[in-house]
Amino acid sequence: MISVILPTYNELENIKVIIPEIFSVLKGSSLEGEIIVVDDNSPDGTAAVAMELVRGNPLKVFVRENERGLATAVMKGFEIASGDIYVVMDADLSHPVGKIPEMVEPILIGNCDLTVGSRYTSGGECVDWTFMRRFTSKFSGLLAKGLTRLTDPTSGFMAIKKDTLNGIKLDPVGWKIVLEIIVKTGARFQEVPIVFSDRLEGQSKLDTKVKAQYIAHLWKLYCFKYPAIFQLFKFCIVGSISQLGMNWTEYR
């Protein structure tokens, strides 16, 4: 079974559209599936509208009242999900729902353990992006090149076999749960080209705080992947600070 996980915050208008669309795609592809909505107590009533859509559908809605953040919402979705394959995607309709069957097929036939929807592999595209938006996305991806060979390391669209997460401790900062999983599992992955569209309803969550969290997350992942190098770096920093302290004492 496929579990489609949708982290939400103030996605009232989008959730009305994406849930029926996902069920339609699953049914049309003869895929047994469920939808997991993990809502961060949206003041616009996103969770209430999602609950109205249950009506006998395999849909679970979980509201988090004391926690915020896309990555941890996805992790809660993993806990709740019943499927053998998890699909993680944004609820704002920026990720193409019609690509779900193509995302899970390579996993079902055993070609890989994980797929990532890529805007930058052959056939991928970003619709109506400004130069600055493209530059920011590309630069963010460039910063992660020491961690993965993904063409789109900042993607948020992923499908993963449940068993791939067994024994893996996830500790993401901010929103890039896909990058966290790629680095920490070392799973066999395949990229699927997607056409990414900006949201039509609601407001983007990308702000200065989110960008700072991304940098902090990259630091943690580099430390995880290259522990010896970063232990040496920390040793040099501590040694330099100590030496400066001694010199200051002598100067006084």
Image: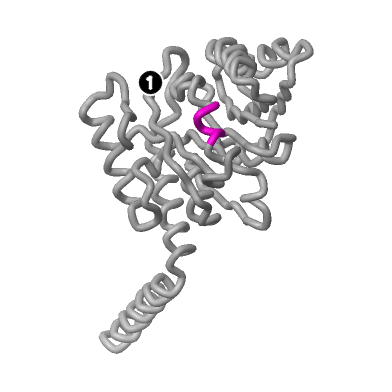
Would you say 143 lies left or right of 190 here? left
Q: Is residue 44 visible?
A: no
Residue 206, given in percent of the width and then of the height, sits at 41, 31
Q: Is residue 20 above or below residue 134?
A: above
Amino acid type, residue under disc 1 in the picture = Ser
Residue that mark 1 sits on: 197
In the picture, measured across the screen, residue 211 lies left or right of residue 171, that is left
Q: Is 102 included in the stretch rendered in magenta? A: yes
- Residue at 59 percent across and 35 percent down: it is 68
**Residue 109 x/y as whole percent:** 58, 40
Residue at left 64%, top 37%? 85
Give 91 or 85, whichever is nearer the viewer: 85
Q: Quadrant of the N terminus?
A: top right
Residue furthest to the left: 131
Residue 103 place in picture, x, y as percent: 51, 32
Q: Which residues are magenta?
A: 101-105
Which residue sits furthest right?
Answer: 56
Residue with the most extreme bottom position: 250
x 40%, y 78%: residue: 235
Considering depth in this image, is 40 or 55 the residue closer to the camera? 55
| Front residue of 193 and 28 | 28
In terms of image quadrants, where is residue 32?
top right
Q: Principal SS element in the magenta part? A: helix
Quadrant including the C terminus: bottom left
**What's the coloring here?**
one colour
Q: Secondary structure at mark 1?
A: loop
Q: Residue at x 46, y 25 (%)?
A: 95
